[in-house]
Image (spheres, grey):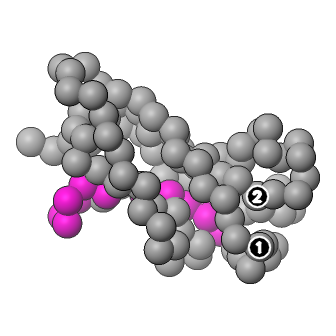
Amino acid sequence: GPAVSSTTTVLIRRSLPELLKGDSAVLECAITQLSSSDLYVTFQANGVDFPEKQYVDLPASNGPHSLTKRFSIPKSHWKTDNTFTCKVNQGYSNSWVSSSKIKLFGE
């Protein structure tokens, strides 16, 4: 069955501890109600994947899982008009994109 159910949420946000440092741009992808471990998370700038894949290794259990993946945005992407999202990918067929988008500056 699908690993991500209708109750799964994918949320992108700034990492507050990193935000306070001021010299880095770290985003977090918070995923709740996951039920499979055959997943990886990617981050996107303006809809285009960064090459880095963060694989999810969940313990085998019956209950749904929640997790947070962090990603440091390269300085080359520190632009005011860039919009960032994160996506949960299952195998080759299914994916779920964060319902929100985030900008590094101006919000």
Residue 13 point in image, percent of width and height: 65, 46
Most prominent secondary structure in the magenta stretch?
Answer: strand
Q: Is residue 33 left or right of residue 85?
A: left
Determine whether 11 is above or below 98 in the image. Answer: above
- Local crowd size for mark 2, using a 10 Å CA cut-off: few (<14), some (14–19), many (≥20): some
Residue 93's disc number: none
Residue 84, by quadrant, is: bottom right
Q: Identify the image quadrant of the N terminus.
A: top left
Report the residue at 35% width, 45% height from top. Answer: 56
Residue 25 in view here: yes
Q: Is residue 98 left or right of residue 91?
A: right
Give the labeled residue for mark 2: 25
Question: In terms of secondary structure, where does tag 2 sit?
Answer: loop
Q: Which residues are magenta?
A: 83-94
Question: In terms of secondary structure, where does tag 1 sit?
Answer: helix
Task: Give the distance between the C-alpha atoms of the residues marked 1 and 2, in whole angstroms.
Answer: 8 Å
- Local crowd size for mark 1, using a 10 Å CA cut-off: few (<14), some (14–19), many (≥20): few
Report the residue at 89% width, 46% height from top. Answer: 21
Please state which amino acid type lies under the numbered disc 2.
Answer: Ala
Give the labeled residue for mark 1: 75
Residue 34 point in image, percent of width and height: 31, 35
Determine whether 64 is above or below 100 in the image. Answer: above
Instruction: Indicate yes or no whether the magenta region holds residue 90.
Output: yes
| Frontmost residue, 55 versus 90 | 55
| Frontmost residue, 27 versus 21 | 21
Residue 11 point in image, percent of width and height: 53, 44
Residue 7 in view here: no
Please state which amino acid type lies under the numbered disc 1.
Answer: Lys
Residue 107 point in image, percent of width and height: 82, 56
Quick one: label 1 or label 2, which is nearer the N terminus? 2
Q: Kindly check if marks 1 and 2 are in contact, taking CB atoms under 8 A apart as contact.
A: yes
